[in-house]
Image (cartoon, helix red, strand yellow):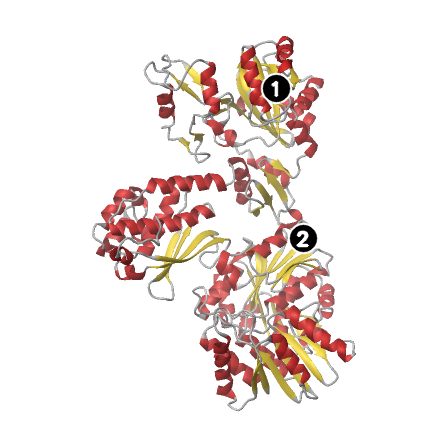
Amino acid sequence: MDATQSTSPDAAQNQMKILDIKAMNGPNYWSVNRHHLIVMLLDLQAMEERPSNTVPGFRARLEQLMPSLYSHRCSEGHEGGFFERVEMGTWMGHIIEHIALEMQTLAGMEVGFGRTRSAPKKGQYYVVFSYYEEKAGIYAAKASVGLVEALIRGEDYDLNHDIQTLREIRENDRLGPSTGSLVDEARRRKIPWIRLNKRSLVQLGYGKNQQRVQATVASTTSNIAVEIACNKEETKNLLEAAEVPVPKGVIIRSEEELEWAIRKVGFPMVTKPLNGNHGRGATTDLQTLEEVRQGFQEAQKHSHSVIVEKFITGLDHRVLVINYKFVAAAVRTPAAVTGNGTSTIQELIDEVNKDPRRGFGHEKVLTEIKVDRATNTVLEGKGLTLESVLPEGEELWLKPTANLSTGGTATDVTDHVHPDNIILCERIARIIGLDICGIDIMTDTLETPLRQGNGAVLEVNAAPGFRMHLDPTEGLPRNVAGPVIDMLFPPGTSARIPIIAVAGTNGKTTTTRLTAHIMRQTGKTVGYTTTDGVYIGNEMMVKGDCTGPKSAEFVLKDPTVEIAVLESARGGILRAGLGYHNCDIAIVTNVAPDHLGLGGIDTLTKLARVKAVVPNTVFSNGHAILNADDDLVYAMRNELDCHIVLFSTDPESPRIKRHTAKGRLAGVYENGYITILKDNWKIRVERAANIPITFNGAAMFNIYNTLGAVLAAYVSQVPLDTIRGGLQTFVPSAAQTPGRMNMFHFRDFTVMLDYAHNTHGMKAIGGFLQHVPATQKIGIIAGVGDRRDEDTIDLGEESAKTFDEIIIRQDKNTRGRPAEEIVELLKTGIAKVKPNMPVKVILKESDAIDYALQNAKVGSFITVISDVIPDALEQVKAYKEREGTAF
C-alpha cells in the first residue's frame, strides 16, 4: 500500500510520512553489536496526537490481522505484552517497529531487535529494527507504515502479499545455503567476511590473509580440477583409467548417432550434457529410442556434446570429501508422492507441500514441490497427468534427479559408509584434484565395497551443495562447513590483519596519516583512508572524502594490505555504520561541536556517542587510546572492554597519574618530549623539535595527534627507533599532509593552507599563530551551510580572535543555504569580537586567494582555510613558481 496516497481529507489526517530510511551494515550509533539495522525517520504528523488507544477498534483489527504479534513481550516482559501496550495506548512508530519485525519473521527471516526513539523535532521518530536482508528490511519498513495506516482507516490489508514479496526478496538476495553455511561457520569463529557481489562470491578474512569462496569453490580449489569435473568425459576417462567403477557410456553430438549409442550401451540409459552440473538437462531410465531422442534434445539445451551411458539402478548417494578427507554421505530421493487410491497427483502434491518442514526456496529443511517442465515430462513418459489417480501404495517420482532444490529429500548415511568406500572416495578427489568434492554414486548401499560390483560412480562435482548434509530430512545434520574453514585457515594462521581506527572531531586525518607513515617504516604494506582519499602503500587509489564504510572495505578487500589504518568519521557511522566489525586499536582525538543538528545529533553528548562507536569495537585484548584532556573522550573508558591507554599534554594530569598508578600505559608531552609512561618508567620517544609537524611544539594540536599515533605504534610493538624515524620524516607538506598546515614561504610573506572547518579547529590554528611572528595575520575563512546558526557565529568569533584581517569566501556546495546568509552569520560573530575589523567578501575561493596573495604586505602571514584542497594547493604552487623561488 502506498503511504503517500490519500482517498479523502480524513484519510490524509491518518497518514504518516517517511522522511528517510538508512540501512546499517556494521557497528553503529544505535547498536555496536547489532550490525544489520534499518533506521527509519518517520513523521507521525497528525497521528502524533492520536496514540493507539484513541483509534477505535485498532487493537482488534491488528490482532486479527497479525495474531502472531502475541509473542512480542515488549516492555511488559511477557507474551501478549505488546498488545497490552497497544490497548493502553502507544505511538504508531512503536507499533510499526513491531510489525516490521514480525513481517520479516513470518517471511522466514528471524529478527527480533527493535527500538523507537524520539527525534529532535516533535512528532518525528527514529524507528529502528533489525533485518535479515537489506532490501527486505527496507520493504518491511515501508509496508508496515502502509499496514498501520490501513488499520487506522479500518480498511482491509493484504498481508499475505507482503509476506510473499519478502520471501521472494529473501531468496533473490540472500546467500545460498552452502555459501551461507560457510559464512555462518566463519562468523562463529570470529572470522570477518565481505560479500563481493550480488551472488555467492564471498571474502573471508581481511587484506593479505583473506580467502575467497564462491558457492563451495574456494580460492584454494584448483582451476584445472574444476575444468575436469565440469567435463564429464574427461572425468570418466581419468576414473576409468584409475580402475574406479564407472558406467559404460559414449559421447555423441547428433541424433544420427543415437542408434549406434543404443547398440553400444544398451537399455536402460541416461542422457546428460557433457558440461553440466546440479542435474540440469539430465534424463534417466530411458527405455526406448524415442525416450533417448527426447533426452538427447533436453541435454543439448545445455551442451552440444551429450553423454549417453548405462542407467545404473540403486539409490542415489552423494559423498562429500573436503581437503581430501571423507566428511559426509547422504542418500537422495527425488520429489515423490505415494498414491492412496482416491487423490489425484496434484492433490497428493498439495498434501505433501503441507509438511511444515517444506517452504519457499531454501527457507526450511525441505523445498515445496513445484510442477514444472521436468514434472510434466515425467508424467507424459508414464502416460499420466496431474488429474491421474495413483493406486494405493504406489510411489511416483516427480523429477528425473534427486535435487533438494526441486523438492527432493536426503537421508544422512555418514556413519554407514564402508572403510573401502571412504578410501575410494578420498582417492577419487585426489585423482580429479578437487579439495571440495561431491561424488555421486549409484548403489544399493555404501555399507559394502563398491568394487564388489554393486554400483558405479556417476559424477564428480565441483561446488557440491551442502544443504543435504547440513539439514537432512532424516539422520544427523553434519557441520560440513567446518572442515572447509579448517582447510582455508589452518591452526596457527590468522584471517585478520591489524586494524587501527581513528575517530574524533579534529585531527583524525593527520593522526591517520602519521600512524600509517610510522607503520610503513616496518616494511609492511599499509592501506589507509582519509578525508582526501584511499591509499594503498604510497599510492592514492581513490580521491575524495573516504572516511566511510565503503572506503574501509576497499582497504580491507585489498589482498596486498598487511595493516589497515582507517579514519572513521561521524557521517559514515550515521549513514551505514562502520565498514569493519572490530579493530585492534582505536584512537579518539577529541569531541568538539561540529555537524550538530544533522542526523538527529544535536548535542555534544550525542556526538560523543557517535564517536564512541569506534572504541567500542576494539577487541578485548586490544587498545583504546583516549585523549585524557577531553572530558567526553575520557568518559568513554567507562564503557569499554579492552585495554585503556590515555594521553595528555599535561604530565601532571590527575587523570594520567591515577591511570598509571594502576600500572596502565599512557603518553604525555613533558619537557619538550613525547613521552611514554609505562609502569614506573618514562620512555623519551622524541623531542618535539625533531618532529616536523609540531613546529617546535608550537602546533599543540599536532602534539595531541602525535601522542595518539606514537601510542598506537608502541602497543603494536613497533620498535622505538622505527617510531622515531617515522616522526622525523613526516613533514607537513602537500605530499604527506595535504591541507594540514602546508607552508609556502614567499619572499615577502608566508601562506599556510589548512582544512580547519569548525570553531575547535580554528581555535587550534589561533593557538599556533600566537607563536608565529608576522606584521599582519590574514585569514581566508568560510562557513558551512548545514551547520547551526550559533556554530557559524562562533566560527566568526574565533576567527576574529585569530586574525587581523579576514576575507570571507564560500564553499562550492553551500548545502542548501544561501551564501549571503552564511556570510552574514560570520560577520555577526566577527563583529561581536572586533566591530571595526576589516572584512572583505570574495565568494569564489580562487579569487579570494588571488586577492590575498596579490595584496599581501611584507611580513604578513596568510592562512587559507580551504574547501577544495588540491585546487588551492595548485593555485599557491603556481604563484610560488612564478615568483621564481623553489619551495
Q: Nearer the viewer, residue 539 or 152?
A: 152
In this view, 104 is above or below 726: above
In this view, 375 is above or below 160: above
Left/right of residue 37 with respect to residue 48 in the rendered view: right
In this view, 106 is above or below 639: above
Alpha-carbon neighbours of circle 1 within 10 Å: few (<14), some, or many (≥20)?
A: many
**In the rendering, at what x and y percent does residue 107 appear?**
39, 40
Left/right of residue 364 with respect to residue 675 in the rendered view: left
Left/right of residue 43 with respect to residue 249 in the rendered view: left
Left/right of residue 26 with respect to residue 18 in the rendered view: right
Secondary element type, mark 2? loop
Furthest residue toward bottom: 836
Furthest residue toward left: 56
Q: Nearer the viewer, residue 305 or 770?
A: 305
**In the rendering, at what x and y percent does residue 502 appear?**
58, 63
Alpha-carbon neighbours of circle 2 within 10 Å: few (<14), some, or many (≥20)?
A: many
Q: Is residue 698 visible?
A: no
Quadrant including the C terminus: bottom right
Q: Amino acid at mark 2?
A: Val
Residue position for label 1: 457
**In the rendering, at what x and y percent does residue 14 appear?**
28, 56
User: What is the spatial separation of the Cα atoms under label 2 and label 1, in whole angstroms?
Assistant: 44 Å
Question: Residue 214's image quarter?
Answer: top right
Give me the disc on residue 561.
2
Q: Is residue 515 visible?
A: yes
Q: Nearer the viewer, residue 277 or 225?
A: 277
Secondary element type, mark 1? strand
Q: Amino acid at mark 1?
A: Val
Q: How many dots with numbers? A: 2
Residue located at (53% from left, 43% from top): 188
Question: Residue 122's image quarter?
Answer: bottom left
